[in-house]
Image (cartoon, rainbow, N blue to C red):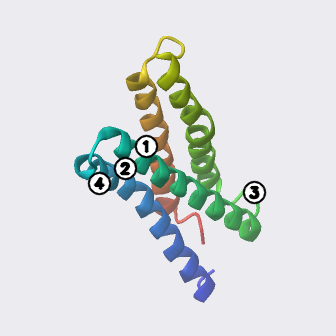
Amino acid sequence: MTGLAGKLSRIMLVLWAGSLWALALWVAPLVFRLAPDRHAAGLIAAGLFQAETYLTFALAFIALWRYGRHRCGAIYVAAALLAINEFIIKKIFEYIRVNGNVAGLSFGGWHGISAAIYVSACLAALLVVWQDDFR
């Protein structure tokens, strides 16, 4: 697809991948640096990560609708990884806040798992851009 629709798809893809990376590399760290306390920073960051997850779901839906299930696998992988963070790891964080740990891991351990999952989603987005998978 080399016409206007293809170019718009490419722009949307690059903006999405860039937003994933920007949130991880500078937005979230800046929120934690500038927010009045860590709890407020955590709430703001959680809201930003949630928005990024739903943006990814929308992009995956558009890709599925336009290109079918087999064309944009890395986008679907990114959406699945972010869904794990949003719907599973986030619940674990809430449980830890009350009970202290889950499966022998404290908040820090689960935060590391969550970060690894998010970086994996970022790498999937990078793979899509690298392979030009969205056109």
Disc 4 marks which residue?
Answer: 26
Packing grade of label 2 (10 A; few <14, some 14-19, many >=20) is some
Q: Quadrant of the C terminus?
A: bottom right
Marks 1,4: beta carbons within 8 A: no
Which of the two marks, 1 or 4, is nearer to us in this view? Answer: 4
State how far apart marks 2 and 4 are (Cα).
6 Å
What element does badge 2 sit on? helix
Which of the two marks, 2 or 1, is nearer to us in this view? Answer: 2
State how far apart marks 4 and 3 are (Cα).
33 Å
What element does badge 3 sit on? loop
Left/right placement of residue 62 relative to residue 116 reads right
Disc 2 marks which residue?
Answer: 24
Amino acid marked by disc 2: Ala
- Residue 119 is marked as 1
Amino acid marked by disc 4: Trp
Amino acid marked by disc 1: Val
Marks 2,1: beta carbons within 8 A: yes
State how far apart marks 1 and 3 are (Cα).
23 Å
State how far apart marks 1 and 4 are (Cα).
13 Å
Q: Is residue 135 above or below residue 75?
A: below
The first of marks 1 and 4 along the sequence is 4
What element does badge 4 sit on? helix
Disc 3 marks which residue?
Answer: 69
Which of the two marks, 4 or 3, is nearer to us in this view? Answer: 4
Packing grade of label 3 (10 A; few <14, some 14-19, many >=20) is few
* Residue depicted at 49% across the width and 64% down the height: 16
Q: Quadrant of residue 86?
A: top right
Left/right placement of residue 69 relative to residue 124 reads right
